[in-house]
Amino acid sequence: MRLLVAEDDKRIAEDVRTVLTAAGYAVDLTHSGQDAWFRGDTEDYGLVVLDLGLPGMDGISILKQWRMSGRHMPVLVLTARGSWAERVEGIDAGADDYLPKPFQFEELLARIRALIRRSVGHGAATIEVASLVVDTRTMRVVVDGMPLNLTPFEYRLVSYLAHHRGRVVPASELQDHVYGDDFSRDGNALEAMIARLRKKIGSDVISTRRGFGYVMGDSV
């Protein structure tokens, strides 16, 4: 799944990106408020980690603009501001959760996993699709009780389709959330990966809807 991290402290930003990448996410990074607003307004993200103190355009203004424009992706606010009034302002502006600095990366990851699950209608940390089980805490995928050895890209693809089970996901959307902003990848690479995955998880778990995309589970 593709995430945006908007944080002006470059050390914190790089640490967060490293942790999120290790947890199986494709991460875009920006240090500018204006760039954060533009990316969030024009790109498809599963979640945004947003610092309130960005230069050029503050986080509260960015949030308000996104929500006014109909952008509904989950937003987790990071800030060094400690007053309850500022936390209320952030939530009223459209934030889905709030994490004050300094924070533990384990808590950041837990909050991100929970926000993403809730945004697509899942409450539990594990997602089941027929005989396939995705554990979002351990990044493990099990089929018929047997754990699979997946590459990071393969895990992103399986996890994204499982999170959106029953929905036909266009190839372009899936490619964005698997590869992030790596524009060197093309549709052939995605098709080849799905072909490899079908050998690992079963040929009937991921279905192709010609001209529309891919779906895991019964489409609605």
Image: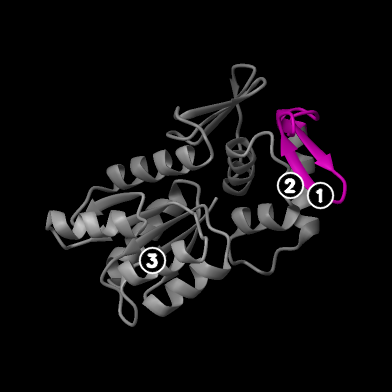
What is the three-letter code of the residue carrying label 2? Met
Residue at mark 2 to residue at mark 1: CA–CA distance: 18 Å
Give above or below for 96 relative to 172: above
Q: What element carries label 3?
A: helix
- Front-most of 48 and 95? 95
Q: How busy is the neighbourhood of tag 3: few (under 14 within 10 Å), some, or many (20 plus)?
A: some
Is residue 17 rendered to the left or right of residue 45?
left
Circle on res. 193: 2
Residue 160 can be seen, yes or no = yes
Which of the two labelled residues, at mark 3 and mark 1, occupies the earlier sequence position?
Answer: 3
The spot of residue 100 in percent (x, y) is 20, 54
Residue 32 can be seen, yes or no = no
Task: Tell me where residue 2 sits by quadrant.
Answer: bottom right
The reply to whether dot 2 and dot 3 touch (C-beta < 8 Å) is no
The spot of residue 167 in percent (x, y) is 69, 39
Q: Mark 3 points at which residue?
A: 64
- Front-most of 79 and 181? 79
The spot of residue 92 in percent (x, y) is 30, 56
Which of the two labelled residues, at mark 2 and mark 3, occupies the earlier sequence position?
Answer: 3
What stretch of residues is rendered in magenta? 199-220
Task: Tell me where residue 33 sits by quadrant.
Answer: bottom left
The reply to whether dot 3 and dot 1 touch (C-beta < 8 Å) is no
- Name of the residue lying farthest toward the top: 145
Q: Mark 1 points at which residue?
A: 212
Q: Residue at x 64, y 40 (%)?
A: 161
Judge depth for marks 2 and 1 and give the one in front.
1
The spot of residue 84 in percent (x, y) is 14, 54
